[in-house]
Image (cartoon, rainbow, N blue to C red):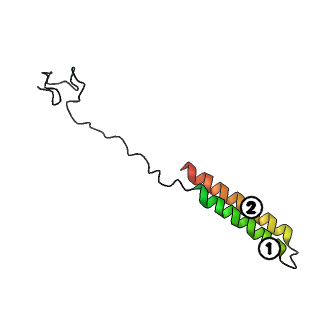
Amino acid sequence: MQCRNCGATIADKALICYKCGTATTEAKYQPAPLPDRSRRSGLMPTLIALVLLALSVIWIERTPGASHSQNVVYVTVAAAVIIVAIRAYARRR
């Protein structure tokens, strides 16, 4: 058999050419495609959400008659923790 790359004479059962290293047949299995990394903007929505939460707390605190200010802070901190946890979980997948 002849090598399809360099033309050297090689054995009929050879897997590669001894002279140039070219495979004599096509690969049986192809490598898995790499995951698409176009979703690199994951940090920006998280930062925007956290800034909006902080601004909403400041706005609610400054409204007149805000007697529920401690509850607003707790809810906002819980929402921020949930947003960050969801982003961390989504990044691992």
Q: Quadrant of residue 65?
A: bottom right
Residue 69 got which mark?
none
Q: Quadrant of residue 69?
A: bottom right
Query: Which one is earlier in the sequence, the residue at label 2 or at label 1?
Result: 1
- Crowd band around label 1 with a 10 angstrom C-alpha radius: few (<14), some (14–19), many (20+): some
- What residue lies at 66% left-to-right and 56% top-to-bottom? 84
- Three-letter residue code for mark 1: Ile
Q: Position of residue 28 (x, y in %)?
A: 26, 37
In-image side of 14 versus 43 (left or right)? left
Give the vertical position of 18 relative to 37 (above or below): above
- What residue lies at 20% left-to-right and 33% top-to-bottom? 25
Give the vertical position of 40 relative to 30 (above or below): below
In-image side of 56 versus 4 (left or right)? right
Q: Position of residue 44 (x, y in %)?
A: 60, 58
What SS does tag 1 mark?
helix
Give the vertical position of 29 relative to 1 (above or below): below
Q: CA distance from mark 2 to mark 1?
A: 16 Å
What SS does tag 2 mark?
helix
Give the mark toward the camera: 2 or 1: 1
- Crowd band around label 2 with a 10 angstrom C-alpha radius: few (<14), some (14–19), many (20+): few
Q: Which residue is mark 2?
A: 78
* Front position in the image: 63 or 31: 63
Q: Position of residue 29 (x, y in %)?
A: 30, 39
Q: Which residue is mark 1?
A: 60
- Three-letter residue code for mark 2: Ala
Q: Position of residue 1 (x, y in %)?
A: 11, 25
